[in-house]
Image (spheres, coloured by chain):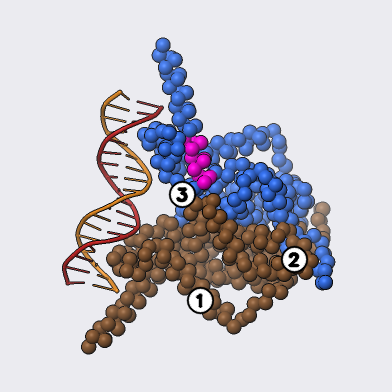
Chain colours: A blue, B brown, C orange, D red
Amino acid sequence: MPQTSAASRKIRAAQTRAALLDAARGLFNERGYLNTKITDITAAAGRSTGAFYEHFAGKDELLRALRAEMEGAIDARMRGLEHPRDHDLTDRDQLRDHVGAAWTVMRQNRPVTLALFQAMVADDPGTGRVWRDLREQTATIREHLEYLAERGHRLPGDPESVAVAMGAMLVTLNYAVLTPPGGEDDRHVIDNLTDLLLYGLTGPASRPADES
Amino acid sequence: MPQTSAASRKIRAAQTRAALLDAARGLFNERGYLNTKITDITAAAGRSTGAFYEHFAGKDELLRALRAEMEGAIDARMRGLEHPRDHDLTDRDQLRDHVGAAWTVMRQNRPVTLALFQAMVADDPGTGRVWRDLREQTATIREHLEYLAERGHRLPGDPESVAVAMGAMLVTLNYAVLTPPGGEDDRHVIDNLTDLLLYGLTGPASRPADES
DNA sequence: GTCTATACCAGGATAGAC
DNA sequence: GTCTATCCTGGTATAGAC
């Protein structure tokens, strides 16, 4: 029964692919993307180098696959939920929602976001890739800021720059913070970032300096 | 006259060292630290690999030398100017001074700051190096924030976290922004960042939403 | 101190059997 | 599709002559 054999081969192949992706995730998370060698991944997955190249052209392509997987998952969750651009990011709840969503996604996909960050930083500056990537990642925020600007709200800078600055802070903190995702710490980070982005160092309205 | 010969050799050695450092700066600036190979540096400096290893144990040590050079220059400029910790970062002028100083230093030493950033990001996450480095780089800011906290000002988070968040934004933007240092753009960036950090997205006091 | 030449190795990638 | 074995490159680092 050649069909059965063909089918099981296909299953086996899918397993291999999954095993490689899984192993990569694990290694990226602990050692980072740049320091993980292809042989590390194959070893962790219990497969051979030959098998690796059967599925991916190289480490970078594997990363693209991981990224696609992540984005697919995000899209799936977002599906149906329309996202109007007229959100008011100067409203604390709405800003917190956005910061929280971004942070949570980054944390839940830490291996991938971390790898993408390293990859972004690793290649030549001068290509403008970092700005471009940050710009893309903050597209939603930028649109909301543009909306605010249109309505006459005076932002600290043009929407693109402000959005990129916010993104820069987020992605770098995601890289710097070690505490495991899903914990109490995340709530703190989200609250802190929300307040910082909302009111800055001065705090809401005129806070009493409390000169003791 | 063996003295003369010895002296001129010493000069020649110093020249080589300087040439290597110089070439490295140039290459780091355009291609980045990670993508610059030792052979690239020696080629650009017109020296041999042998000469390189006579002066530095490796690329990382050369970077440390560049860093030391930069810090020396900063110290020299700061010398004499005492820096009391009771600066009030909620005062726009004072905050702007700090942001501007940090930004200017980063820009003027772009090859080095850029290289340090890449090196920081490149090694294993999980070591906590990124947080530590950011923490160190923002020591001054943190102290000012601690001073504010002591006086009862309620910050968006604990001084350390807030300072690190600010640092994360600054260093990453320094990496992302391509525009050459010293120009008009720098003033804009500094102003924007100052306003963002000072008031956040809401802007100073209660800004009219201007519902047209 | 600086050069040329070369040893050395990690890691990426392929060939061919199964 | 997967394996084993191997080739091959780029890049680090050293040896030894000058």
Q: Is residue B13 above or below residue B118?
A: below
Judging by the rendered image, the residue that carries numbered circle 2 is: B149
Amino acid at the residue labelled 2 = Ala
Q: Is residue B54 above or below residue A148?
A: below
Side of D6 where A200 appears, left or right: right
Q: Is residue A8 above or below residue C14?
A: above
Number of other residues with Cα within 10 Å of mark 1, as a class: few under 14, some 14 to 19, many 20 or more: few
Q: Was residue A65 drawn as part of the magenta stretch in this picture?
A: no
Magenta stretch, residue numbers: A20-30
Residue A171 in view? no
Q: Is residue C13 above or below residue B88?
A: above
Amino acid at the residue labelled 1 = Ala
Amino acid at the residue labelled 3 = Leu
Residue B198 appears in which quarter of the rendering? bottom right
Number of other residues with Cα within 10 Å of mark 3, as a class: few under 14, some 14 to 19, many 20 or more: some
Judging by the rendered image, the residue that carries numbered circle 3 is: A34
Judging by the rendered image, the residue that carries numbered circle 1 is: B73
User: Quick one: label 1 or label 2, which is nearer the N terminus?
Assistant: 1
